[in-house]
Image (cartoon, rainbow, N blue to C red):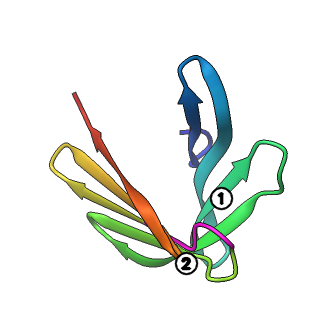
Amino acid sequence: MEDGVLVGTGTQRAGEEVLTEERLRIEQGDDGLVYVASPKGQAPTRFPATSVEQDHLRFENPEHDFPQSLDYRLSGTTLTVEVRGEGGGFDLVLEKK
């Protein structure tokens, strides 16, 4: 966490080769929580929170090509991220060890 902002980096690899990389952050905006994705070499994209609950956060930007929504669900030590857009999506399951 940096100055009240949750930050992270997403990296997709094929072996040792980095295919994509982006900086991610969740911050408090003027109108609530905002998820900001900054893919390498591209302008940042903002996804305002549309649902904020104790164990669930949903961010949406229907104008974005992909993704258009991100759902974060916490259950015990498991964080599930559902990434969705037109035509499909994918899930990430992260376990705290």
Q: Is residue 36 above or below residue 9?
A: below
Task: Classify residue 38 as left or right of residue 48.
Answer: right
- Residue at image coords 56%, 27%: 14
Amino acid at circle 2: Glu
Residues packed near mark 2 inside 10 Å, few (<14), some (14 to 19) or many (20 plus): few
Task: Classify residue 14 as left or right of residue 41.
Answer: left
Which quadrant holds residue 91? bottom left
- Residue at image coords 56%, 29%: 13
Point out residue 4 in the picture as x, y percentages from the top left corner.
56, 48
Q: Is residue 9 above or below residue 29?
A: above
Point out residue 97 in the picture as x, y percentages from the top left corner.
21, 27
Question: Which residue is outermost to the top?
Answer: 16
Residue 69 part of the magenta segment: yes
The answer, for residue 85, to whether it is visible in the render is: yes
Point out residue 58 in the picture as x, y percentages from the top left corner.
43, 72
* Residues under numbered marks 1 and 2 in contact, where contact means CB atoms less than 8 Å apart: no
Residue 52 part of the magenta segment: no
Residues packed near mark 1 inside 10 Å, few (<14), some (14 to 19) or many (20 plus): some
- Residue at image coords 46%, 71%: 88
Q: Of label 1 and label 2, which has the lower sequence position?
A: 1
Task: Provide the residue designation for mark 1.
Answer: 36
Task: Provide the residue designation for mark 2.
Answer: 86
**Residue sitting nearer the eye, 81 or 7:** 81
Task: Classify residue 27 as left or right of residue 77.
Answer: right
Q: Which residues are magenta?
A: 65-70
